[in-house]
Amino acid sequence: MTTPQRAHRRLVQRTYGTLADPADAARTWADLAGLVRGAGSFDPSCTTFVAAFDTEVPAGGEAAYRHLLLMAEEDERRHASEDPAPPRRTGVDFVITVAGQRFFVSLLLLAAPALSFTPCAQFTRGTAIPAPRCSETPVLWD
């Protein structure tokens, strides 16, 4: 059996208390920004960060958007990005910038909610599967 030189995918998962809670949003931002700024531990071409939450309520898209707004405020307060901007909805998903890195964010509703942060850089390479475009405003069906 041989060991691959580089992992094909890298998933980092952390658990927090409540989606849309200001303290948990600040911790989510700190963990994600720490990952982005970490020496060699973050590869935007293959790293995905998942923030799982212990509580079931609130679990909807509005709570996810509120959580991301709080994270964007933390990013701006800490001057972590050159061009801070609020999170943007892309249909049912979102795009946010944390520590200068743009992420496509999906809300996962399992037993409890989770947010999946995938760097937009992963969607700029050619793929056989259609992927969201983080740099352009999406075209939504009427």
Image (tube, rainbow, N blue to C red):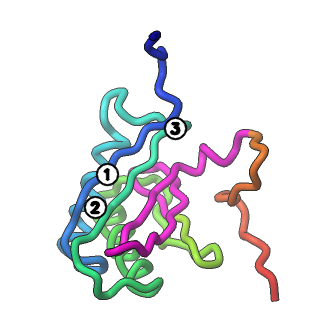
Find numbered disc 1 in the image and state the secondary structure of the residue it sits on. Answer: strand
Find numbered disc 2 in the image and state the secondary structure of the residue it sits on. Answer: helix
Q: Which residue is mark 1?
A: 13
Under mark 1, the amino acid is: Gln
Under mark 2, the amino acid is: Thr
Q: Is residue 36 left or right of residue 87?
A: left
Q: Measuring 70% from the left and 55% from the top, which residue is drawn there?
A: 131
Under mark 3, the amino acid is: Cys
User: In the rendered view, would you say 113 is above or below 46?
Assistant: below
Q: Measuring 28% from the left and 61% from the top, which residue is drawn there?
A: 28
Q: Which mark is residue 46?
A: 3
Observer-side mark, 2 or 1, equals: 1
Q: Which mark is residue 28?
A: 2
What's the magenta region? Answer: 96-125
Find numbered disc 3 in the image and state the secondary structure of the residue it sits on. Answer: loop
Residue 6 on the magenta segment: no
